[in-house]
Image (cartoon, rainbow, N blue to C red):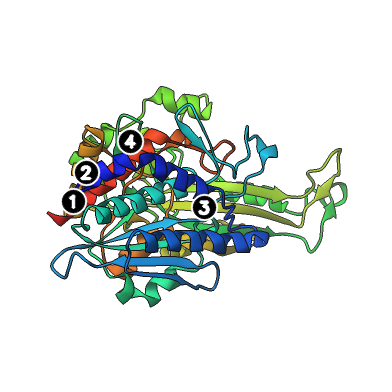
Amino acid sequence: MTDAHEFAQANGERFRQQLFDLLRIPSVSTDPARKDDIRRAAEWLADDLRRIGFERVEIKPTAGHPVVYAEWLGAGDGAPTALVYGHYDVQPAEIEAGWTSDPFEPVERGGKIYARGAADDKGQVFAQVKAAESLLAAGGAPVNLKFLIEGEEEIGSPHLGAFVSANRDLLKADVCVISDTSILAIDQPSICYALRGLAYMEVEVFGPKQDLHSGGFGGIVHNPAQALAEMIAQLHHPDGSVAVPGFYDDVLPLSDEERAELAKSAAPEDYWREMTGVPAFWGEAAYALHERIGARPTLEINGLVSGFYGEGSKTVLPARALAKISCRLVANQQPRRIFEQVRGHIARITPPTVRSEVRLIAEAHPARTDLNNPAMRAAMAAYEKGWGKRPLFERGGGTLPVMADIQRELKMPVVLMGFGLRSDGAHGPNEHFHVEMFHKGINTAVYFFEELAK
C-alpha cells in the first residue's frame, strides 16, 4: 500500500480486533489488585508500537503506574514533531452496576463497541496508534512522532507532572495532540480549545469542644452548622456571581468574535433543561449558558456534613461542620491565588462565635489554545477532510490537568482532537465507542499529521 488512508481502510477489521484485545485487559488504576493488569496493558501497547515500526519504545517507571513512551523520528530534523498523549488505565466496572454484558469482554452491537475504556481512552488513543501504523506502512510519516501513554489518568495523574518536568528533552515537540475528549455529534465535529482548572478545598467550622444537647445549650451556642450555612450564603452575590474579592481579577474577557464562534456550537436551553431537570437556570445572566460553563469561573458547594443525619431523631448541637468547595477556573487564573482569596474571604465572614479553617485539597491549572495557532488550523483542516464538515469550537467546563502540565512544562500548544461523543457513557455502565467514530478518528489523525507537515 502506498497511501495511509487506503491502508487504514483495508485494515479496519484487524484494527478493531486489536482494540478488542486491548479492551479485554482490566487496567483499573484505582484497584491495587489490578496492578499486574496495568503492567500488562502497558506491555501490550509497547509491543504493538514496536511491531508497527517505532524506533524507540520504553515502559518508563513513575512513583505509581508506568508510562509508555515511543518515538519515530524518521521524518528528519526539518519536519515538525508531534507528541501524542493518551492513557491506558480505565475506571472500575462491574456487571452488577448495570452493564448488559461483561465490561471487559468487548462486544459490537448496533455499530457500537461496548466495553470499559472503549471511549475513555483506549479507543481514542488507539485510533492515534493506528493512524501512525497506517502512515509508517505507507512509507513513513511526514512528521516525527512521539507517544506518551500513561496509566494513572483515572486517579488524577498524580505522577505525570513530575515525569513531564523530568523529561522535557525527551518529550520535546512542536505540538501535543490529545484524543481524550468528545465532539458535538457523529456528523458534526468540534474542537474543545479551552478547559477549566480547579481549586478544591475544605472549609471546616468549629464551635463547642464537643457535641452538645440542643435543649441544654441551644440559644447560647452558635451552631457550627448554622454558622457554616450563613457563611456559604455570603459566597455569592444575588446575581450568581462569586462574592470573593479579587476572584475575577485575572479572568480574560471574551471577545465578540469568540462569543460569536462559541454560539455556533451552543446547545439550546431545552437540551440543558432535559439534562438537568431543573425548573429554572441560575447564574450570571450577562452570560449565555454555554459561556457560564466554559468561559466563566465558578464556586460550587460539593458537599456538606454536620451533626446527626441517621434514621430517627437526635437533638444534637454539633461541634463541627464541614463543606467541600470547588472553584472551576478559566485561563489566566491561578489555583493557589484563588485558594488564598477564598481563605481570606472565609476568615473575614467567620463570626466571632466560631472558628474556621480552610484547607487546599487539590489543584489544577486551566488551559487554552489560541484558535489561530498553526497546529489548531491543521486540526481544523483534518476534521473537515475526515468528517466532510468544518469543526465548531467549544470551551469545556471540566479539567484535564495534563493539558496545562504540557503547556507549562514543555512550552508547546496542545490540540484536543476528540473522537468520542458525550453520550458514550464514559465512567458509567455500558460505555461504548461508535465504530464509525473509531475509523473516522484514524483517518482524521492521518490528515492531521499530513496537514501539520505543511
Which tag, 2 or 3, sits closer to the chain's start?
3
Element under label 3? strand
Residue depicted at 54% across the width and 73% down the height: 63
Residue depicted at 17% across the width and 68% down the height: 76
- Kind of residue at disc 1: Glu
Query: Which residue in the structure is indicated by mark 2?
Result: 382
Which tag, 2 or 1, sits closer to the chain's start?
2
In this rendering, which labeled residue sits more in front, label 2 or label 4?
2
Could you tell me how far apart the alpha carbons at marks 1 and 4 are, in whole angstroms? 42 Å
Could you tell me how far apart the alpha carbons at marks 1 and 3 are, in whole angstroms? 41 Å
In this rendering, which labeled residue sits more in front, label 1 or label 3?
1
Element under label 1? helix
Query: Which residue in the structure is indicated by mark 3?
Result: 326
Residue at the front extreme, as displayed? 1
Circle 2/circle 4 CB separation < 8 Å: no
Which tag, 2 or 4, sits closer to the chain's start?
4
Disc ID at residue 286 = 4
Question: Where is the C terminus found, in terms of image quarters?
Answer: bottom left
Task: Give how far across and how far down residue 453 sits, in percent.
Answer: 15, 56
When the figure is inspected, residue 60 is found, relative to residue 48, above or below; the finding is below
Could you tell me how far apart the alpha carbons at marks 2 and 1 are, in whole angstroms? 8 Å
Query: Which residue in the structure is indicated by mark 1?
Result: 450
Q: Nearer the viewer, residue 291 or 356?
A: 291
Which tag, 4 or 3, sits closer to the chain's start?
4
In this rendering, which labeled residue sits more in front, label 2 or label 3?
2
Task: Give how far across and how far down residue 91 sits, in percent.
Answer: 57, 50
- Count all numbered tags in the image, as a single digit: 4
Residue depicted at 22% across the width and 46% down the height: 447
